[in-house]
Amino acid sequence: MQIGCGQTIKEIKMNCYLYFWRYEYSEGKSIQKYIYVGRADDPMAVNKANDMTYEYLVGLRKALDRLIEVMETQVTR
């Protein structure tokens, strides 16, 4: 399983478009999913992509914290 997210710019017909991407686990494998955000030169699109990245990372941190709590009850030190 791969974990991660990011932002990328794709050039299509001489125009630049901003995408948010993340890994999703589906049917036993990790796939990279792209979500169109807007034109790369649009400040609102950039803010939206930043919000999407932040939300993904906060959710990931919460999931990791839960996993760590479970593991702490199972690990002897």
Image (cartoon, helix red, strand yellow):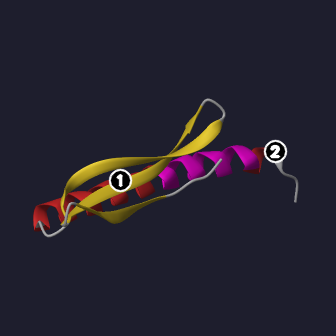
Q: Which residue is mark 1?
A: 55
Where residue 76 sits in the image (x, y, percent)? 88, 53
Where residue 51 sits in the image (x, y, percent)? 27, 58
Q: What crowding class fits label 1: few (fewer than 14 Cα within 10 Å), some (14-19), or many (20 or more)?
A: few
Q: What type is the residue that disc 2 sits on?
A: Gln
The answer to whether mark 2 and mark 1 are in CB contact below 8 A is no
Q: Which residue is mark 2?
A: 74
Quarter of the image where one finds residue 11: bottom left
Question: Which portion, as a residue range, is magenta?
Answer: 60-71
* Residue at 81% over, 44% down: 74
Above or below residue 11? Residue 71 is above
The residue lying furthest to the right in this view is 76
The residue lying furthest to the top in this view is 27
Quarter of the image where one finds residue 31: top right
* Residue at 51% over, 57% down: 4
Answer with left or right where residue 71 lies relative to residue 7: right
Above or below residue 2? Residue 30 is above
Answer with left or right where residue 7 lies relative to residue 51: right
Above or below residue 69? Residue 49 is below
Nearer the camera: disc 2 or disc 1: 1
Q: What type is the residue that disc 1 sits on?
A: Glu
